[in-house]
Image: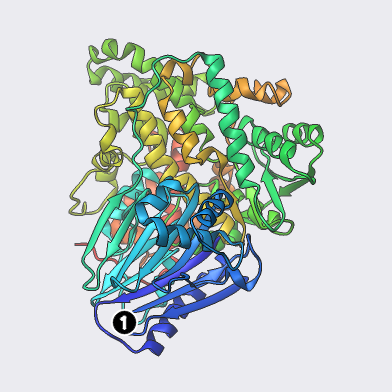
Amino acid sequence: MCGIAGIFSAFSQSKESLAVTARKMAAALKHRGPDDEGCWTDAAGALALGHRRLSIIDLTRDGHQPMVSSCGRFVIVFNGEIYNYLELRDELRKEGFAFHGHSDTEVLLAALSHWGTEAALARVAGMFAFALWDDRERRLTLVRDRAGKKPLYYMIASRTLYFASEIKAFKVLENVDLSVAPEAIYHYLTFGYVPAPGTVYRGIEEIPAGHYVVFNSDLSAASRPYWVLSRSNRRERISFAAAVDEAEVLLKEAVRIRLRADVPVGCFLSGGVDSGLLTAVAALQMDRKLQTFTVAIEDGLFDEGPGAALVARQYGTEHHVLTIKPDIRELLPQLIQAYDEPFADASAVPSLCIAAEARKYVKVVINGEGGDELFCGYRRHLAMKFYDQFGALFRLIPEAIFALANRILPPPGDFRTAYAFAHRYLRGLGKTPYDRYIAWCVDGFDEREKGDLYRCRPLIRESSPQVLAAKAADHASDAPFDQFMAWDFFLNMHDDMLVKMDIATMAHGLEGRNPFLDHRLIEWAFSLPRDILLADLRTKPVLRSLAKRYLPAEISLAPKRGFEIPLIKWLREDLRDMVYDACLTRDGIVLDLFDRRYVNDLLDEKLPLDPDRWSKRVWILFMLAMWGNMNENRLLLS
């Protein structure tokens, strides 16, 4: 795992100047790669590649980057891991290749030079973002892994392409102005993050997951998908028992190849089904003790420790429990700086804390991201199953009836209760599929609320529901349940969960690996019919049934519990003064954009919102205000 950066110019420049700039961009990513650094420039003065290395496989200089191919034609800067590099190396050796070291980067570079980009990408299993320079054809290819686990951003300014693993690398550029994109803020208010491929900055975009983009010497570009996830290979006939067996085989293999490292490997252990399964499967395949990490937050609504301890004892792991009472006032500036863009997933706070603790013991950690999105781990999946079955009946009822019911029913006091679930369910009925997903999943400011919030609504080309529709355009004709699942994968996981975990871990030079996001497991899960994915009235029945083979009943049968932080308490007590100061700063981004009276009413809890929805909206504005206060870039409001 590393940080990469580079410059590709449409005209010749000073090689020394290019190298200085590339090194400065890479230096901004030192946290991603504290072990080594490198820079390479081409003879014509058009290209500079910068690299910061986190040494995981082949700790010697043979793994140094940028790396030049044995034929001298290709140069690569690579961030990530190719988990099946041993198998690919054996295959390439049979075809005449000799290797100097044993890094996965050298294997990937040989595969790309020998088989070509598409054929090589079809063979690799891993997480990655890389830049490949073809010196003969004078073209640069930027590539991102199938699931979008590793980030890669780019911008073009003054006939020069810049790319990097994180946006902060662009902020060191001289004579390149960064201005905020109003449409990004508009959609952030709904989702709590800026939907990719856009970013909060004009001109900076993200390479789409599962794509590669080829830039020619004049910077003309062609973007191509090399992996498309679809339901076309759906399994019409498979028994539930067979699905559980197949899931076990695929998960064991996904974990096995993710244990490959020349440094210690650990596992985040939350006490839930996903992390418990990964811990069990990993511990049984290792020849040394697995290190596990659990976080408990003081003032949290529940403690994951007891469930995690059960699994740790059963598999004899070296278990670490981090009980934190975070100084939230001190942590927030660190969080804002790490994430570069406004990011309102509050679970980023404990994620940042446990990553810092885990890094004291290991450089690689396995985590369970993707299990809920692929195997129906949320209550909203049960809600969608019910809607799918009775949608025709609901569509006969005018939307005004559902709106009236939501107005007259008292708001829930605790969002984990059955009443809170029913109340939120009603909010999604009578709406379009896009508004329903927003209500049941992200639950930020809707279009009406944003109309009330803005002093002057920006000239937005698309509404947030339209952005959501574009996120899974290939699934527009799917059944409602399948479309809902596609949004969970292409929006919620891509732009929230994976961003949260990548930044939290890499901020501390810690590599996170996600067995559930092995592309073969993803494709298999997408092939399962709904009546297998949700075979009963519990979330993720396939994984729960598999967990019975490895975990105590207290874990496999426990209800889904997300990591809950005391957000309402923080906003009402610990952070109250800080929230008011940040949001109501005279020259701050919040009052630049939004109506002061509406913001005051929201902060004072005068709007008709239950505590959970109130806290989400305040946190969204607070994170935006903090981000704005820490970034000197001026808004372009037109």
Dot 1: element: loop
Compared to 113, does 379 lie above or below? above
**Residue 91 spot, x, y in % from top left:** 52, 51
Q: Nearer the viewer, residue 320 or 159?
A: 159
Q: Quadrant of the N terminus?
A: bottom right
Where the C terminus falls, by quadrant?
Answer: bottom left
Picture quadrant of residue 47: bottom left
279 vs 309, left or right, is left
Q: Quadrant of residue 360?
A: bottom right
Residue behind mark 1: 175
- Residue 480 rendering spot, x and y as whole percentages: 31, 23
Residue 143 in view of the camera = yes
Going by the numbered disc 1, the residue's amino acid type is Asn
Q: Choose between 531 and 464: the one closer to the eye.
A: 531
Q: Considering only vertical position in the picture, is 295 above or below 624?
A: above
The local crowd at label 1, few if under 14, some if 14 to 19, many if 20 or more residues have their Cα within 10 Å, is: few
Q: Residue at x 26, y 58 (%)?
A: 182
Residue 448 drawn at (x, y percent) = 26, 39
> Is any atom of residue 564 visible in this view?
no
Left or right of residue 366, residue 346 in this image: left
Residue 420 vs residue 352: left or right? Answer: left
Horizontal and vertical percent position of residue 74: 40, 69
